Image (spheres, rainbow, N blue to C red):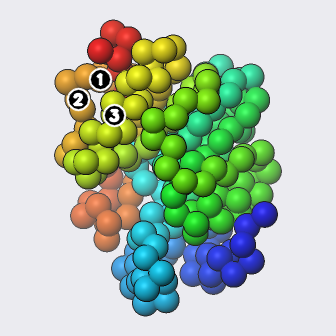
Amino acid sequence: MADPDKADFIRAHTRLVTVPHAPEIRLYLADEATALWEKTEEELGEMGLPPPFWAFAWAGGQALARYILDRPEIARGRRMLDFASGSGLVAIAAALAGASDVEASEIDEFALAAIELNADANGAAISPRAGDIVGQDDGWDVVLAGDVSYERDMAERVTEWLATLATRGARVLIGDPGRTYLARDRLEALAEYRIPVTRALEDMDIKRTQVWVFRDGAK
């Protein structure tokens, strides 16, 4: 169950709203990116917590959510992991599409609380999973990763792990709007969307965003 203090903070600084590119889902999202970022740093920065990525529907996540909702056969009856889940958007889409089990991994305690709140708001059965799970393999059938290529070291580490999962037979889907460190040479695009985003964060209103898979068994 979500920590009451964290849940109260999230409710106080966000609104439950419809996701632009996945209107089947509602999330607790921030109206003003800068204001929440400053508020989080002011109240929580001394605790060493990361920025509030959980308070926004990022483009890669919206693309993955739309892709899964439109193709429920990908999720139906399968064990799924939403890596670096943030708000839980993609995990919720997987649950609504019929996955038998959905884990949403995060290193941020506030994100874990947001995932629980958002899952409850959508009637979705999701198991939040705390901590760094890169390098682990619990036999998931499908692994989903949105917006994980914006920082070099993280992108390289995560890409190698995801490639290993794909090689052993997991279906790995990556949602990305052209982040700098996306391993394009190892991937091929399955779908493309025009995703409404927050100008304060992305410096534009719409981002062309793709859903990707590894080429040739993740080589």
- Quarter in which the C terminus is drawn: top left
Q: Residues within 10 Å of mark 3 (few under 14, many from 20)?
A: many
Q: Is residue 69 above or below residue 51?
A: above
Q: Quadrant of residue 29?
A: bottom right
Residue 196, image x and y in percent?
Answer: 40, 54
Name the residue beneath numbered marker 1. Answer: 187
**Which tag, 2 or 3, sits closer to the chain's start?**
3
Q: Which residue is depicted at the point 63% across and 50% down? A: 129
Q: Amino acid at mark 1?
A: Leu
Give the left or right position of residue 118, taking residue 56 as reference.
right
Q: Which residue is depicted at the point 49% across and 50% down? A: 132
Q: Is residue 179 visible?
A: no
- Residue 184 is labelled as 2
Q: Amino acid at mark 2?
A: Arg
Observer-side mark, 2 or 3, equals: 3
Q: Quadrant of residue 119?
A: bottom right
- Residue 28 is labelled as none
Residue 121, image x and y in percent?
Answer: 75, 59
Q: Which residue is depicted at the point 32% across and 66% down? A: 201
Name the residue beneath numbered marker 3. Answer: 159
Q: CA distance from mark 2 to mark 3?
A: 11 Å
Q: Residues within 10 Å of mark 1 (few under 14, many from 20)?
A: some
Q: Secondary structure at mark 3?
A: helix
**Which tag, 3 or 1, sits closer to the chain's start?**
3
Work out whether residue 129 or residue 150 is closer to the camera in this orientation and state it. 129
Q: Are marks 1 and 2 in contact (CB under 8 Å)?
A: yes
Q: Residues within 10 Å of mark 2 (few under 14, many from 20)?
A: some
Q: CA distance from mark 3 to mark 1?
A: 10 Å
Q: Secondary structure at mark 1?
A: strand
